Amino acid sequence: MFSLNALRSTIVITTLLALVALTGCAGGPQFETLAARVTSEKPVTLPQSAVLEVQLKDISTGDVLASSRYEQLGRLPIPITLQYASEAINRDDLYRLSAQIRDDDRILYLNPDPVSVFSDNDAAEPDIPVTTTGAAPSR
């Protein structure tokens, strides 16, 4: 038969082991930050109501891995950051950044060619060049 002290010790040790195991499970995803800049050929002052939306997509699967929205933009270029789960990146897949600047429901600027990231020859902090769509800003 167990003594009361031996039973207490067994319960305490079992509880501690369970807590350690649960702590390992509660870690969650590890996030990384991707920095970039949204640029244009000429300096552009954007309307006060303009909104910039940037996405990181896995072209291999079509999944959006990260997105950011920016308001009160001012002038281009605009530095941006995206937080993404590092375990979502598979070095064999293709990843692209895309950006568009909207004013209400009008797309004012977009990047016609998505920018490659995470490949061997890609910039660590890429530029995302946008061009005008010709749409007039809302008034």
Image: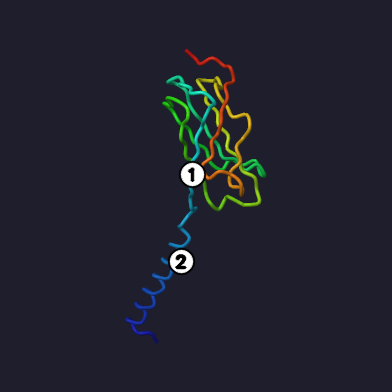
Q: CA distance from mark 1 to mark 2?
A: 28 Å
Q: Which residue is mark 2?
A: 21
Q: Position of residue 92 (x, y in %)?
A: 66, 51
Q: Mark 1 vs mark 2: which is more N-terminal? A: 2
Q: Quadrant of the N terminus?
A: bottom left
Identify the residue at image location x=54%, y=26%. 41
As drawn, which residue projects farthest toward the top?
139
Residue 137 drawn above or below residue 33: above
| Nearer to me, 113 or 53 | 113
State which mark lies toward you, 1 or 2: 1
Circle 2: residue type: Ala
Identify the residue at image location x=61%, y=49%. 120
Circle 1: residue type: Gln
As drawn, which residue projects farthest toward the left?
5
Identify the residue at image location x=42%, y=20%. 48
Residue 27 drawn above or below residue 109: below
| Nearer to me, 36 or 2 | 36
Q: Secondary structure at mark 2?
A: helix
Q: Which residue is mark 1?
A: 83
